[in-house]
């Protein structure tokens, strides 16, 4: 008897009890669809985190100035300017893994157009900053070196600010905006960035050239940077190296001995992203493990029904043996029945998991990402479950004594 | 007895069953030789050992001691797979309660032995169709057992027994569940098979049925009590319905 014939006999036997066969596979269907939906949603969340960090900027490091200490009370990082413009120049010129470095000064300010006003954060920075953050201009022109050096009164607005000052989809390029009562010309509008994972609106910002910021918005110290330094490393793997090199450079420049606390800190966003992804990966693995348990329960359901089926069909087994079925023919028949049930359950589970996951994702506005390898693994795994749990009943059937089996009522 | 070796030869066969601590001696030394083309009725009261003898002849069971030669080959020491092959190729079974697979058409039931013999679909169909025509069911191939009378079901079972061209057909109380008219029809088919050279061994407790055989072996307490040859009575069906191929 060849495998195809065995399969045909098995399918006919299963179709004789359609309802029972369906209920038996239900365990597998639910198990597999749970795996599919969970992994799809988990992977989707991971992809979303990745996208969010990518929107912060790729290969990004942020250098924060150190803390103040006054009367034993230590302020947080950034509470006292310790980074100098010379530090920035040194980072730019002396660290080979650094591609871009730009200062970011910030201040809260009220912006006003002719008939609207809006409170937002105004940043002073240099053109490199937009390269570090992968942030192109949507309308008008980007910040130029001459803007940065000349201290011109131009402003670059985020989409949220444009919407609030000029109305949605307006083109404000060339119009005038007053910041702290100083008129600025809108030179460019930045493309939309969206939200950070903690809900901060990246588009609720306005940028002015660094020198303009210092002279018109916030008269600061000349020697120190009263803000942060954004750094773009040459590549993602070089980010960690860049962090180390900048740390060494700044410790050296600030004369900090070994064992002493640094007066600055460096945030590595790639590391943060990896950590968040890893924790999401753990959650996905846990969910998949729970789903795998469901799959095992489905397997036990198959075993249960196959055992009932073997008992019910004892006479049939006897007849088959009497007309010449060998023990291995009987074994194969019941094993293939279990395998067919489980594999069919696997395929139906994929369909259900994809549909269910999609419905869930669209209802809850979760992202979803389907991985084909998980689908293949699910089907293979359910087939294995079928074989594992079908083996015992099939062996039981094949070991029946034909005389006893024929006499069975 | 002819000079050629008999088709079935049992030599001092015993069979002991263990029911818990009790030993049941079902056969206590049976010797029997059946030539090819014979028709033998094995008779006896229940518990006489006739069913055990039938199971051993049918390669469903193995003797505890003694030898059993089927077509000259010692089969009492064969394993389960080899016995299955003997049942598939050399033997055909007919049971009292027909033992057809339910919810399976007549032709598929008949094809069953050929499936295990590894024949292709086309050849299986062809041979099953021929076998069903031979027992007069050429027009009921796609009927299911529950759509057929007892006599028709038993004829499907006979077709299944002969489809693989066996040398022996073993029938265990083949008329036990049939009325007397249908019994004669079934016996007529067995006589036709015997006429075509197939050896027929049947177990029965009805003397009326044993009359159609050429030899009657009487069992008692696990031994052969008597072994008589006789001129078999011809089975003539009352109506045209029972004649092989005679049904419209």
Image (tube, coloured by chain):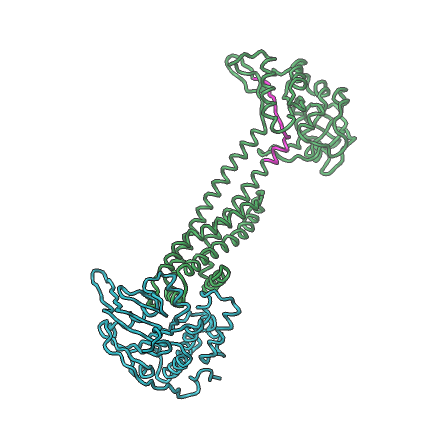
Quadrant of the snapshot with the C terminus of chain A:
bottom left
Q: Is residue A24 visible?
A: yes
The answer to which of A249 and B134 lies nearer the viewer is: B134
Q: Percent x, y for residue B23?
A: 21, 63
The answer to which of A309 and B168 lies nearer the viewer is: B168
Residue A277 lies left or right of residue A152; in this view the side is left
Q: Colour of chain A?
A: green
Q: Percent x, y for residue A87?
A: 64, 16
The answer to which of B64 and A240 lies nearer the viewer is: B64
Is A55 part of what is drawn in magenta?
A: yes
Q: Is residue B97 visible?
A: no
Chain appearing in cyan on the rendered image: B
Q: Percent x, y for residue B78?
A: 35, 62
Query: In the picture shown, does residue A308 fall above or below B49?
Result: above
> What residue is shown at x 39% (from left), y 82% (from top)?
B191
Specify the farthest residue to the front. B3
> What residue is shown at x 76% (from left), y 35% (from top)?
A171
Which residues are drawn in magenta? A50-66
């Amino acid at each position: 008897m060849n495998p195809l014939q065995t399969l045909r006999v098995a399918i006919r036997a299963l179709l004789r009890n359609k309802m029972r066969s369906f209920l038996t596979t239900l365990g597998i269907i639910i198990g597999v669809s749970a795996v599919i939906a969970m992994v799809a949603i988990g992977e989707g969340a991971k992809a979303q985190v990745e996208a969010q960090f990518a929107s912060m900027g790729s290969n990004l490091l942020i250098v924060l100035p150190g803390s103040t200490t006054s009367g034993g009370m230590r302020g947080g990082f950034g509470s006292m300017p310790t980074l100098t413009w010379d530090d920035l120049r040194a980072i730019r010129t002396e660290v080979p893994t650094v591609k871009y470095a730009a200062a970011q000064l910030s201040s809260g300010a009220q912006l006003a157009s002719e008939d609207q006003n809006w409170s937002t954060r105004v940043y002073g920075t240099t053109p490199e900053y937009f390269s570090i953050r992968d942030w192109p201009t949507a309308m008008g022109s980007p910040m130029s070196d001459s803007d940065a050096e000349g201290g011109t009164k131009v402003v670059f607005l985020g989409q949220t600010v444009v919407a609030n000052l000029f109305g949605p989809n307006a083109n404000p390029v060339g119009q005038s905006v007053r910041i702290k009562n100083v008129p600025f010309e809108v030179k460019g509008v930045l493309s939309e960035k969206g939200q950070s994972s903690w809900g901060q609106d990246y588009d609720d910002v306005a940028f002015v050239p660094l020198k303009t910021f210092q002279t018109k918005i916030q008269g600061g110290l000349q020697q120190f940077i009263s803000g942060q330094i954004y750094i773009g490393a040459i590549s993602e793997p070089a980010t960690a190296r860049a962090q180390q090199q900048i740390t060494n450079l700044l410790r050296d420049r600030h004369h900090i001995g070994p064992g002493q606390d640094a007066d600055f800190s460096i945030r590595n966003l790639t590391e943060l992203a990896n950590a968040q992804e890893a924790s999401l990966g753990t959650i996905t693995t846990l969910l998949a493990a729970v789903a795998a348990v469901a799959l095992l329960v489905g397997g036990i359901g198959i075993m249960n029904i196959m055992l009932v089926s073997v008992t019910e069909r004892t006479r049939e087994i006897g007849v088959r043996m009497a007309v010449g079925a060998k023990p291995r023919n009987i074994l194969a028949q019941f094993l293939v029945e279990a395998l067919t049930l489980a594999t069919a359950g696997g395929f139906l589970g994929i369909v259900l998991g994809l549909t269910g996951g999609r419905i869930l994702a669209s209802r809850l506005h979760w992202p979803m990402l389907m991985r084909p390898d998980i689908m293949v693994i699910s089907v293979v795994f359910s087939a294995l479950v079928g074989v594992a749990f079908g083996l015992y009943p099939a062996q039981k059937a094949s070991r029946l004594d034909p005389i006893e089996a024929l006499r069975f009522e | 007895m002819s000079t050629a070796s008999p088709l079935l030869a049992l030599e001092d066969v015993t069979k002991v069953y263990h029911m818990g601590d009790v030993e049941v001696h079902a056969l206590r030394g049976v010797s029997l030789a059946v030539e090819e083309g014979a028709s033998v009725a094995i008779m006896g009261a229940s518990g006489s050992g006739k069913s055990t003898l039938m199971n051993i002849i049918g390669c469903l069971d193995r003797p505890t001691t003694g030898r059993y030669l089927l077509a000259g080959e010692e089969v009492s020491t064969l394993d389960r797979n080899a016995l299955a092959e003997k049942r598939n190729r050399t033997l055909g079974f007919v049971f009292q309660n027909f033992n057809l697979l339910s919810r399976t058409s007549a032709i598929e039931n008949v094809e069953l032995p050929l499936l295990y013999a590894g024949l292709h679909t086309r050849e299986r169909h062809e041979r099953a169709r021929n076998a069903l025509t031979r027992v007069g069911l050429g027009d009921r191939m796609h009927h299911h057992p529950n759509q057929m009378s007892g006599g028709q079901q038993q004829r499907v079972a006979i077709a299944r027994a002969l489809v693989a061209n066996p040398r022996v057909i073993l029938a265990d109380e083949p008329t036990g569940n049939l009325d007397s008219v249908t019994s004669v029809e079934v016996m007529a088919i067995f006589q036709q098979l015997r006429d075509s050279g197939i050896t027929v061994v049947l177990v029965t407790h009805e003397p009326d049925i044993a009359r159609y055989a050429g030899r009657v072996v009487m069992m008692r307490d696990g031994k052969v009590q008597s072994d008589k040859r006789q001129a078999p009575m011809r089975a003539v069906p009352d109506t045209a319905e029972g004649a092989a191929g005679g049904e419209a």
